[in-house]
Image (cartoon, rainbow, N blue to C red):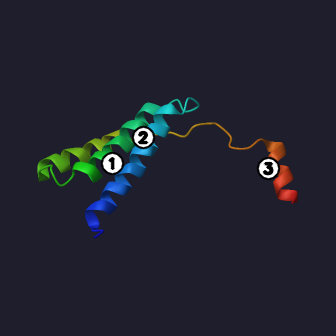
């Protein structure tokens, strides 16, 4: 039977993928901040039940500190070139 535990495992796996993808994004100068943020979210989903209330609180404070210290950013890579987007819009 599928219960809520497996939903948290699946969501944590998605966030782990975000962390790995962020760490590999060489166009983003703040990629390590992004990777840390998503890794902390992954830890929360996978191990939140095993942490105490204080542990979960520290984890949330680390998330807030990561975001509050402006360590998050976006890569500058384009998914498509300008010409490809123009052709797609004309279609």
Q: Secondary structure at mark 1?
A: helix
| Disc 2 crowd, CA 10 A, few/some/many (<14, 14-19, 20+) | many
Report the front residue among 8 and 1: 1
| Disc 3 crowd, CA 10 A, few/some/many (<14, 14-19, 20+) | few
Q: Earlier in the sequence, mark 2 or mark 3?
A: 2
**Residue 19: image tag:** 2
Q: Which residue is mark 1?
A: 41
In this view of the protein, can residue 22 be seen by the observer? yes
| Quadrant of the frame with the C terminus | bottom right
| Quadrant of the frame with the N terminus | bottom left
Q: Residue at coordinates 68% horizontally, 40% vertically from top-left?
A: 78
Would you say the residues marked 2 and 3 are in contact, meaning their CB atoms lie under 8 Å apart? no
The image position of residue 27, as x and y in percent, is 59, 31
In this view of the protein, can residue 70 be seen by the observer? no
Q: CA distance from mark 2 to mark 3?
A: 28 Å
Would you say the residues marked 2 and 1 are in contact, meaning their CB atoms lie under 8 Å apart? yes
Q: Residue furthest front?
A: 1
């Amino acid at each position: 039977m599928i219960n809520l535990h497996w939903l948290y495992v699946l969501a944590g796996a998605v966030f782990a993928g975000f962390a790995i993808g962020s760490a590999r994004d060489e166009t983003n100068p703040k990629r390590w901040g992004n990777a840390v943020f998503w890794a902390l979210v992954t830890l929360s989903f996978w191990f939140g039940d095993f942490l105490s209330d204080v542990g979960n609180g520290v984890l949330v404070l680390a998330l807030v500190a990561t975001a509050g210290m402006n360590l998050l950013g976006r890569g500058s890579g384009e998914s498509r070139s300008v010409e490809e987007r123009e052709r797609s819009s004309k279609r």
